[in-house]
Image: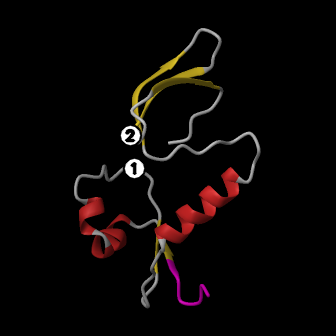
Amino acid sequence: MFTGMEYTENHARIRERMPLIMKHRDPNQSIAATYMNIGTDINFAAITRGLIDHITSTPQVRLHLKHHVSDLSKQPSGQRKVTVHDQITGATNEIHTKFVFI
């Protein structure tokens, strides 16, 4: 699967392949890149679905769709207070949680 993959830390070589990425980059900054002549493609929709399927299979995780987050703050307890507006019902709720995944 990775046959033919080129790895380089050479700024000039990376600039040839990715001129916009390198346009304002500090020449003293460490950087590395890989390149495949055949190209690559990433299906971000499939990755996102897989991630959501995985995290929502955990009983402690609740997924809220069609909600607008209007405020997010860290409480003295270390928890996060999330103020959300349900775009379907119109209700506004506060959720107190240890983690917020965005």
Which label belongs to residue 83? none
User: Residue 63: x and y, percent?
Assistant: 59, 45
Residue type at numbered disc 2: Gln
Which residue is found at the position 35% from the left and 64% from the top?
A: 11
- Image location (x, y in percent) of residue 79: 62, 20
Question: Extreme right residue here?
Answer: 59
Q: Quadrant of residue 92?
A: top left
Q: Position of residue 98 (x, y in %)?
A: 65, 27
- Start-end of magenta stretch: 1-6
The residue closer to the viewer here, 97 or 24, is 97
Residue that label 1 marks: 29
**Secondary element at image label 1:** loop
Element under label 2?
A: loop
Tag in front: 2 or 1: 2
Compared across the picture, whether 40 is left or right of 63 comes to left
Place of residue 73 in the rendered image (x, y in percent of width and height, measured from the top left): 48, 19
Measured along the vertical axis of the image, is residue 57 above or below residue 12? above
What separation in Å lies between label 2 and label 1 (alpha carbons)?
Answer: 45 Å
Name the one closer to the observer, 83 or 44: 83
Q: Residues within 10 Å of mark 1 (few under 14, many from 20)?
A: few
Q: Which residue is mark 2?
A: 87
Name above or below for residue 51 compared with residue 102: below
Q: Which residue is at a point 46% across and 65% down the rendered structure image?
A: 9
In the rendered structure, which amino acid carries the disc numbered 1? Gln
Q: Is residue 49 magenta?
A: no
